């Protein structure tokens, strides 16, 4: 059996909120011919960034997440605004949430669909080498964020023990580990055109 996309019969926006819109699609199954309603959360693209200092420390953030009413350990990230590129957003969020900047161009770690069942947006991930503290945080009124530095070699342990549990943060580190063939904090120093993560 060949699976085909469903034909959208109608589409309407139900509600608009600060960070997303709620949309209802009526779509027809090509297998049964029956129509069903799908509820979609429309959102702008997201970005997150793994900032790495010259000491091979990751600039992490601890922040309150009301969805789970708990504190999470994450990397900086946020929503693309206006005409920003994903790289622009990554650099802006890094500076706003941590006060850090980077001395080098960002390295793309790819993109994922956060939840393709009910969302249409994309999350882009980046690596920033040479991160350094340049100033103070510039937090939104609804943000409570603490910046901490963790050795890159400790990240697998934090993941295994469940201290890092945000799915999009896990994806970013997974893509980093794959990109650099990194296992348990060890990076192959002979990777072509890449070198070790901490150097050029």
Image: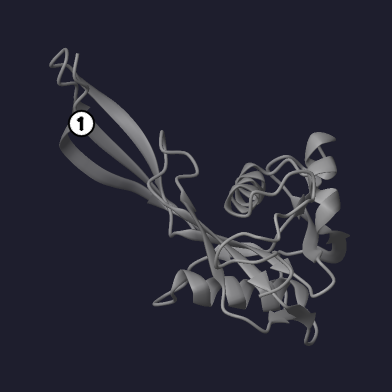
Is residue 18 visible to us here? no
62 lies above or below 158: below
The image shows residue 184 at horizontal and vertical percentages of: 79, 44
Give the answer, above or below, for where 105 lies relative to 143.
below
Residue position marked by numbered label 1 in the rendering: 5
Q: Nearer the viewer, residue 16 or 114?
A: 114
| Residue 96 image-quadrant placement | bottom right
Q: Secondary structure beneath disc 1?
A: loop
Question: Looking at this rendering, what residue extends furthest in the bottom direction?
Answer: 134
Residue furthest front as drawn: 190
Q: Residue 3: where, in percent of width, then height?
A: 22, 22
Residue at 22 percent across and 42 percent down: it is 11
Percent of width and height locating residue 27: 20, 30
Is 5 rendered above or below residue 13? above
Q: Quadrant of the N terminus?
A: top left
Name the residue located 60 percent from the left edge and 47 percent from the top edge.
178
Residue 131: image location, x then y, percent: 74, 77
**Left or right of 57 on screen, residue 52:** left
| Quadrant for the C terminus in the image | bottom right
């Amino acid at each position: 059996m060949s699976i085909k996309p469903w034909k959208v019969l109608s589409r309407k926006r139900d509600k608009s909120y600060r960070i997303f819109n709620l949309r209802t699609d009526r779509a027809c199954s090509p297998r049964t011919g029956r129509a069903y309603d799908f509820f979609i959360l429309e959102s702008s693209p997201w970005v997150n960034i793994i900032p790495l200092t010259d000491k091979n420390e990751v600039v992490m953030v601890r922040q309150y997440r009301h969805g789970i009413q708990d504190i999470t350990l994450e990397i900086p990230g946020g929503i693309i605004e206006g005409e920003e590129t994903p790289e622009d957003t990554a650099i802006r969020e890094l500076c706003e949430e941590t006060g850090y900047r980077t001395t080098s161009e960002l390295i793309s770690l790819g993109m994922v669909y956060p939840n393709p069942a009910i969302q249409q947006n994309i999350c882009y991930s980046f690596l920033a080498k040479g991160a350094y503290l340049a100033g103070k945080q510039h937090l939104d009124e609804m943000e409570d964020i603490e910046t901490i530095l963790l050795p890159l070699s400790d990240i697998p342990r934090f993941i295994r023990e469940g201290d890092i549990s945000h799915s999009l943060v896990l994806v970013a580190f997974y893509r980093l580990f794959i990109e650099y063939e990194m296992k348990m904090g060890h990076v192959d120093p002979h990777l072509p055109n890449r070198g070790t993560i901490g150097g050029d």
